[in-house]
């Protein structure tokens, strides 16, 4: 009987496998899923878009007038891109993972 090294066993345990539990919502999670969908709609809806536009405009104006550090201003603007582009980012990661797997 051949013994495997602990490193080989660790690599086998960490190997990527499909997450079967994540394919559907668990039973009884309907209210939680609907509450999270409402929260997502609120955070990414018209009000959030208007607030983000105002924030980017204010940060841009403050950066141009020299009242704000450029690094902090760029962080705010990149944060807005990540917030509103999160669905596209996740779908890109999923597409890459499905092609690689």
Image (cartoon, rainbow, N blue to C red):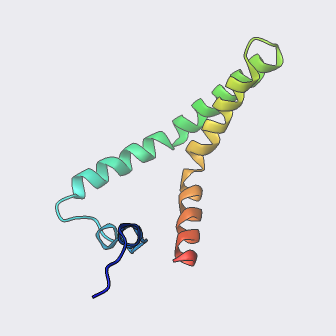
Q: Nearer the viewer, residue 64 or 37?
A: 64
Residue 47, given in percent of the width and then of the height, sits at: 52, 35
* Residue 67 appears left or right of 49: right
Is residue 13 left or right of 26 when viewed as pictured? right
In the foreground, 10 or 15: 10
Eyeballing the image, is 4 above or below 6? Answer: below
Residue at left 43%, top 71%? Answer: 16
Q: Residue at x 28, y 65 (%)?
A: 25
Residue 99 coordinates in the image, percent (x, y): 57, 77
State the residue in front, 38 or 32.
32
Q: Is residue 36 left or right of residue 52?
A: left
Please report the residue visible at 22 percent of the width from the left and 64 percent of the height from the top.
Answer: 26
Asked if residue 3 is positioned above or below residue 78 in the image, the reply reads: below
User: Which residue ends up furthest to the left in the rendered image?
Assistant: 28
Residue at the image point whose x is 32% and y is 73% from the top: 20
Q: Quick one: which residue is furthest to the bottom in this view?
A: 1
- Against 85, residue 52 (above or below) is above
Q: Position of residue 28 (x, y in %)?
A: 17, 60
Horizontal and vertical percent for residue 97?
53, 70
Report which quarter residue 73 is drawn in. top right
């Amino acid at each position: 009987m051949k013994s495997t090294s602990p490193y080989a066993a660790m690599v086998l345990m960490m190997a990527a496998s499909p997450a079967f539990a994540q394919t559907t919502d668990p039973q009884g999670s309907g209210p939680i899923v609907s509450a999270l969908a409402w929260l997502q709609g609120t955070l990414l809806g018209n009000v959030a878009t208007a607030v983000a536009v105002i924030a980017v405009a204010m940060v841009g104006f403050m950066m141009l007038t020299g009242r704000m550090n450029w690094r902090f201003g760029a962080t705010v603007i990149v944060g807005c891109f990540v917030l509103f582009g999160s669905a596209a980012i996740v779908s890109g990661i999923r597409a890459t993972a499905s092609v690689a797997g």
